[in-house]
Amino acid sequence: MRIIGGSLKGLRLNPPKNLPVRPTTDMAKEALFNILQNKIEFEGIKVLDLFSGTGNISMEFASRGAEQVISVDRSIHCVHYLKDAARQHGLTSIKAFKDDVFKYLQLETEQFDLIFADPPYDMNMIPEIPKIIFDKNLLLPGGLLIVEHQSMQNLSNHPAFSEQRKYGHSSFSFFNN
C-alpha cells in the first residue's frame, strides 16, 4: 500500500497485519484518483471517509490537499493506526473516529464535498448508504458520493447514481448531488 499522489507521493504504508480490513488495491485506488483528478479540485475540500480501515484513502486525500478529512471506522485498532500515521506524517487535516458508520451517519449534520464509503463487501446494508447520505443531505451542492463494492452488486437504482467503474472484483459507484 502506498500514497500515489500529493505531498506524500510514494510513501509506503505498512499497517499491522492483524487489522480487520480489506484495503482498496493500489491499482483500483490509482484508477479512482485518476477519475477524480478530472472531476474535482482536491485542494481545500471536505471529505468524509466511511469504513476507513487503514486510512489509506483518507491519507491520499490529505496528501493531495484536502482541508478536512473525517475518517470513521468501528475498529479501534484501525483508528489508532490512522491517528498515528497521520501524526507521524504531519497530516493535521485528518480526524479519525471510532464509531459504527450507520450510527455516525444518523448524528452527522455537516456537509461534505466528497464522501467515500468502502464497507465490508458482505454487508447487506450497502444499498442503504446512498439513501441515508442523500436523505440527510450530507453532500454540498455539486458534491460526490463514491461507494466501493463487489462488481456483481448493482447500485444504479438510486436517483443520484451516475456511473459504475469496475476493477476486477471491485467497483466504484458514483453518485452526484
Image (spheres, rainbow, N blue to C red):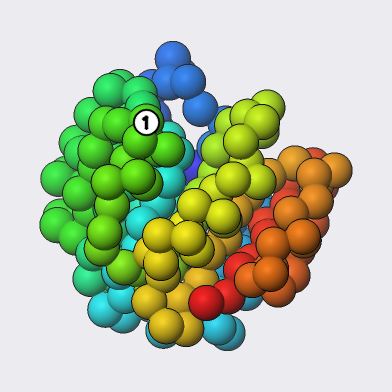
Q: Residue furthest top?
A: 18
- The image quadrant of residue 78 is top left
Name the spot of residue 116 as percent of width and height, x first: 48, 56
Q: Is residue 56 visible?
A: no
Residue 129, placed above or below residue 81: below
Residue depicted at 51% across the width and 71% down the height:
144
Q: Residue furthest front?
A: 135
Between residues 93 and 5, which one lies in front from this camera angle?
93
Name the spot of residue 68 as percent of width and height, x first: 23, 64
Residue occupied by mark 1: 100
Q: Is residue 168 visible?
A: yes
- The image quadrant of residue 65 is bottom left
Residue depicted at 40% across the width and 51% down the height:
49
Residue depicted at 28% across the width and 52% down the height:
108
Name the spot of residue 88 as percent of width and height, x first: 17, 44
- Image position of 159 (left or right of 5): right
Residue 109, placed above or below residue 83: below
Between residues 39 and 161, which one lies in front from this camera angle?
161
- Image position of 53 (left or right of 97): right
